[in-house]
């Protein structure tokens, strides 16, 4: 196709060329394409000023990027922009010209390599042309970033691996409308659509999504005819008039909506809330006094409006004489000038001269011309073009920042400016992430779709009869939050006497306390409401079923919520729980202080003479005893129930084992002092003491493990104690296991008491056996009293009794065993000597 056709285009040279495809003319007289014979120039008619502005927006964006020192530094972007004349064949030919080049000869490097004519293309302006063009470009992995193609089919990455777009797909438009319906509780809506691919596919998708989401139902599903068929329009409007649906959704072209509204006006069908698709949501042709009584308050989905600072100044500089490529084959700027000023450049056509037409001088002032080109107050398509250009630029920038040896390509290679290939740019396009000056985040998902965003428009009918379109919110999707609808509801105009959103339901909502009962043979949105049974509730509007109250609750009289039964357990928030917690922490703190005193004075005779290692271990075990009481406070949970008795049992066995070994050592010392018993101490060395404590504690640990494995304690809601409340307690699981655990502690405590009692009168100035005897007496008394108190205490008071027993016995051991020692260490240091401790009593006293 080299040099076969002269296509309208803009061109600017650069280190990297980006292509663009735009609809600058509406139609064409185009001969049948042939790849073998020379063809005529395409003749395009009907100058499209908005398409021309989009092309200029791309030129502006590239100029802006070239001036930006932080984006693509030392690289100049160029562009090659083609007019597709709103025709697939021309657009297709232009795309192939972009990727294949227009020159007859090409200059290659020594390896017949180099970059292609363009690395990426911005376009196309319709889904049909985009599908055809992208199918070919994808074969060569040339990225095509569309600013207008919305067909959901283009999200198929298998068919279009190099396609991207900065406009949301139709699938998101459908979800956006569903979000608006959800916001206002509209569950009953009529659906109208243009009978073509756009309208039919969008309507079918909407109906399917609505059914799957369970948000509502379609009251009627009507296709608008292509021609202005009055009989068909009468039938459709009659259906609308008879339906109870107050919301009408239309996926239609503006011309079809105009034809329909003529019939709506004739039949005077008011009181409807219209929702417009992006195809007609900003169409000013419907904003007329005769239509606004019916269309006032319409909510519509529209492409995101953006602001592009500097664009208007750039457009004002457009002039035929300054156009860099203003040849006969590229006369777009000249055509724009002629279209705007209603004149012709020389050579003048004879018919133009005969009609007395004006001659273009080039001195006309664009700033004073009446042209839509300079109206930059509502940039929507231009904004998506702007984002598409910047997406390509950011991808190029990221690609050229690659560090050799750390690149993503074979051998960790990078792309170079001289040999870069389009497929390499595709890789980086998939990973772009930037924010526009307008504040919109741009990145592509795995399907090549940008994070979608739509403006929500509202048609306002002013008191003076005028109209305007207000932007009242956005619906968008972000990577962190997902899809969200943001509306400024105070600005929305509702065309109803109440000035509030209408209700559009088949059946009124079922209030809490009732459930929905479907009507056989009718849509799911049509139902009856039935009250919930006793013990069941529904706490939501339009609940499909009643739910049973949990075991701890019962239904209220209104059946709309469960009334909790009073739940009783020893809580951290009540006075008793706070007191026990405070005492437990206080005991832990005192134990830590005593441990610190003993560690600090560990070299003194008082500490060394009383088996310092066992004393340290005993203090540590007492800390654990104090802390384990906290497991009995608070809401019972599976882990606290399993841990509380195991921690309690092991902590106290460790404590009593240390006391037992200390008592045995005291007896052994005095036995060893007798003649003939010098070898007895070899059985009570440091290793033997540690081993004895470990062995005794291990037995308790084995008991706990066997108990947890065979019948583990677990939270239990006991309803037998009280009829009006539930006692939340820990079921011990196995009473035998609990009894063995307590019995083993009692056995060790009793043995310690007996041994200490035997050694109480040993002739030592500071006989620790007396302290042990007294401490064991307190310990045994507390736990003997505990058993009947525990059995007779209901509910949380059983836990209180057990916590009290733990704290009382722990304080008893701490004070009895370490109180006198701390007294001597801190207040009577003169007695903390070896002579004082080892001295014998006076035999005369």
Image (cartoon, helix red, strand yellow):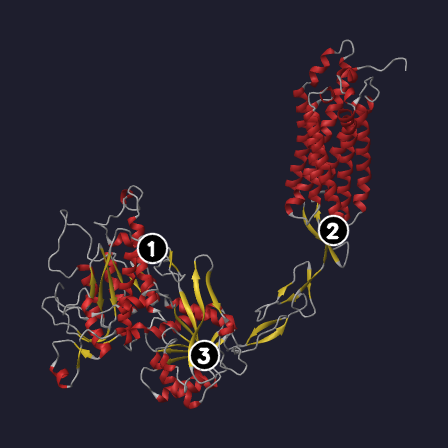
Image coordinates for residue 603, horizontal then vertical, percent = 69, 20
Mark identifier at residue 574: 2
Q: Which mark is residue 460?
A: 3
Give x and y (percent) for residue 811: 77, 35
Secondary structure under tag 3 reads strand
Residue pictured at 9% horizontal, 68% vertical: 38
Q: Tell me how far mark 2 sits from mark 1, CA to CA.
A: 58 Å
- Please tell me how many numbered marks the rendered image carries: 3
Q: For mark 1, what is the residue?
A: 430
Sequence-first tag of 1 and 3: 1
Q: Could you give the CA–CA distance between mark 1 and mark 3, rounded to whole angstroms?
A: 40 Å
Say if 672 sits above or below 140 in the image: above
Image quadrant assignment for residue 616: top right
- Give the crowd class for mark 3: few <14, some 14-19, many >=20 residues within 10 Å: many
Q: Nearer the viewer, residue 553 or 517?
A: 553
Tag 3 or tag 2, which sits nearer the N-term?
A: 3
Instruction: State the image coordinates of residue 818 (x, y, percent, origin top left).
Output: 76, 28
């Amino acid at each position: 196709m080299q040099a076969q056709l002269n296509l309208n285009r803009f061109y600017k040279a650069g280190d990297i060329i980006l292509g663009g495809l735009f609809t600058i003319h509406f139609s064409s007289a185009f001969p049948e394409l042939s790849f073998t014979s020379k063809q005529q120039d395409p003749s395009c008619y009907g100058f499209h000023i908005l398409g021309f502005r989009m092309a200029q927006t791309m030129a502006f964006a590239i100029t802006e990027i070239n001036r930006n020192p932080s984006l693509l530094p030392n690289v100049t972007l160029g562009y090659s922009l083609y007019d597709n004349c709103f025709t697939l064949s021309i657009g297709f030919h232009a795309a192939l010209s972009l990727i294949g080049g227009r020159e007859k000869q090409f200059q290659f490097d020594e390896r017949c390599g180099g970059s292609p004519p363009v690395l990426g293309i911005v376009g196309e302006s319709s889904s049909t042309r985009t599908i055809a063009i992208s199918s070919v470009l994808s074969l060569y992995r040339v990225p095509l970033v569309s600013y207008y193609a919305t067909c959901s089919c283009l999200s198929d990455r298998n068919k279009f691996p190099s396609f991207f777009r900065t406009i949301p797909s139709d699938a998101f438009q459908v979800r956006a409308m569903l979000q608006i319906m959800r916001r206002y509780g509209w569950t009953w809506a009529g659906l109208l659509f243009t009978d073509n691919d756009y309208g039919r596919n969008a309507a079918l998708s909407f109906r399917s999504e609505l059914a799957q989401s369970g948000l509502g139902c379609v009251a009627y599903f009507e296709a608008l005819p292509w021609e202005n068929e009055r009989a068909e329009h009468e039938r459709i409007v009659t259906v609308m008039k008879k339906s109870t649906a107050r919301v009408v959704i239309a996926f239609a072209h503006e011309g079809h909506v105009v034809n329909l509204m003529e019939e709506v006006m004739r039949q005077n069908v008011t009181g409807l809330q219209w929702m417009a698709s992006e195809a007609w949501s900003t169409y000013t042709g419907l904003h007329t006094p005769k239509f606004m009584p019916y269309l006032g308050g319409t909510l519509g989905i529209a492409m995101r409006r953006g602001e592009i600072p500097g664009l208007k100044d750039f457009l004002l500089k457009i002039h035929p004489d300054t156009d860099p490529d203003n040849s006969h084959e590229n006369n777009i700027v000249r055509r724009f000038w002629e279209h705007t000023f209603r004149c012709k450049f020389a050579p003048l056509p004879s018919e133009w001269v005969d009609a007395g037409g004006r001659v273009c001088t080039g001195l006309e002032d664009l700033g004073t011309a009446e042209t839509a080109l300079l109206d930059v107050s509502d940039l929507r398509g231009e904004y998506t073009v702007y984002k598409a250009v910047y997406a390509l630029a950011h991808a190029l920038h990221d690609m050229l920042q690659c560090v050799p040896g750390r690149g993503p390509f074979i051998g960790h290679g990078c792309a170079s400016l001289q040999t870069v290939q389009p497929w390499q740019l595709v890789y980086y396009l998939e990973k772009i992430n930037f924010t526009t000056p307008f504040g919109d985040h741009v990145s592509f998902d795995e399907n090549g779709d940008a994070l979608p965003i739509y403006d929500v428009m509202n048609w306002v009918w002013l008191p003076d009869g005028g109209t305007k379109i207000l932007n009242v919110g956005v619906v968008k999707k972000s990577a962190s939050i997902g899809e969200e609808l943001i509306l400024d509801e105070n600005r929305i105009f509702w065309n109803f006497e109440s000035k509030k959103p209408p209700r559009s339901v088949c059946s009124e909502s079922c209030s809490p306390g009732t459930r929905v009962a479907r009507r056989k043979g009718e849509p799911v949105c049509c139902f009856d409401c039935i009250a919930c049974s006793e013990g069941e509730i529904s706490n939501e509007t339009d609940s499909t079923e009643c739910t049973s109250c949990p075991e701890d609750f019962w239904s209220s009289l209104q059946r709309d919520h469960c009334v909790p039964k009073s739940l009783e357990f020893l809580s951290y928030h009540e006075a008793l729980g706070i007191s026990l917690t405070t005492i437990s922490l206080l005991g832990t703190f005192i134990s830590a202080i005593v441990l610190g005193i003993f560690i600090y004075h560990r070299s003194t005779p008082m500490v060394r003479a009383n088996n310092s290692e066992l004393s340290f271990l005993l203090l540590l075990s007492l800390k654990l005893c104090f802390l384990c009481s906290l497991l009995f406070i608070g809401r019972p949970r599976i882990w606290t129930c399993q841990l509380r008795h195991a921690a309690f049992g092991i902590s106290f066995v460790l404590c009593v084992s240390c006391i037992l070994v200390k008592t045995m050592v005291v007896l052994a010392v005095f036995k060893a002092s007798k003649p003939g018993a010098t070898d007895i101490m070899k059985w009570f060395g440091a290793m033997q003491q540690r081993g004895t404590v470990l062995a005794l504690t291990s037995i308790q640990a084995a008991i706990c493990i066997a108990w947890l494995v065979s019948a583990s304690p677990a939270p239990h809601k006991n309803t037998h104690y009280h009829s009006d409340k539930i006692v939340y307690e820990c079921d011990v699981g196995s009473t035998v296991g609990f009894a063995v655990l307590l019995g083993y502690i009692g056995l060790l405590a009793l043995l310690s008491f007996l041994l200490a009692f035997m050694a109480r009168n040993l002739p030592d100035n500071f006989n620790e056996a007396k302290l042990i005897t007294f401490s064991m007496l307190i310990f045994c008394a507390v736990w003997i009293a505990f058993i009947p108190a525990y059995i007779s205490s209901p509910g949380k008071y059983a836990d209180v009794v057990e916590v009290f027993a733990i704290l009382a016995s722990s304080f008893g051991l701490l004070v009895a065993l370490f109180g006198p020692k701390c007294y001597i260490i801190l207040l009577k240091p003169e007695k903390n000597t070896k002579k004082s401790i080892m001295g014998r009593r006076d035999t005369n006293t």
